[in-house]
Image: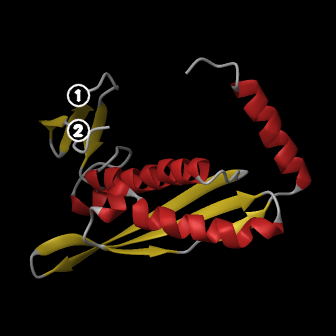
Amino acid sequence: MSSRYSYRANARWTSARRGVVQADSEMKSIIFSAPPEFQGESGFWSPEDFLVAATASCFVTTFRAIAEFSKFEAVALEISVEGVVEKGDGGYQFTELILKPKLTIRQEGDRERAARLLEKTEHSCLISRSLKSKITMEPKIQVAEPQMTEQAEIQLVGLSGINR
């Protein structure tokens, strides 16, 4: 396995404070704008949205990898990420990212292990490790109701036949 990877994206200005960004891969382009707070248009992704979305998606994929490696079966994971932007001496910057993962586990006995895996994920996530902003995590771990566990298992069985 390589120890160096490279990811590229291209962005171009299209009008006013709007543009389009595309990764080198074959993903669809995304129209973006400056956020309304900076005279941009609402209804479009902003660079600030991209940063918090990258942090959230990285947390989820990192947790799944760590959980799989640890042979830990979670029922569900959602995360809300809040990015705080403040004006400092050098201008505006993200000063804090608040991670609010909500992890659903199968049984109460898994709570302590789940908390350790969330902590490990916070320290292992590539995106949040690469930022100089303060990272705060406020986890919530809940035990699945039996009905929720059965529904998740039915969904997993249904997905097992999908080609990846």
Tell whether label 1 touches label 2 (CB within 8 Å): yes
Q: Quadrant of residue 55?
A: bottom left
Q: Residues within 10 Å of mark 1 (few under 14, many from 20)?
A: few
Q: Position of residue 114 (x, y in %)?
A: 66, 65
Q: Residue furthest right?
A: 146
| Residue for point 80% across, 38% down | 153
Residue carrying label 2: 7
Q: Is residue 105 left or right of residue 19?
A: right
Q: Position of residue 24 (x, y in %)?
A: 23, 28
Q: Quadrant of residue 23?
A: top left
Q: Position of residue 152 (x, y in %)?
A: 78, 41
Residue carrying label 1: 24
Q: Residue furthest left?
A: 90
Note whether 20 is above or below 4 in the view shown.
above
Q: Secondary structure at mark 1?
A: loop
Q: Is residue 10 left or right of residue 80?
A: left
Q: Residues within 10 Å of mark 2 (few under 14, many from 20)?
A: few
**What amino acid is labelled 2 in the image?**
Tyr
Report the label total: 2
Front position in the image: 38 or 149? 149
- The tag earlier along the polypeptide, 2 or 1, is 2
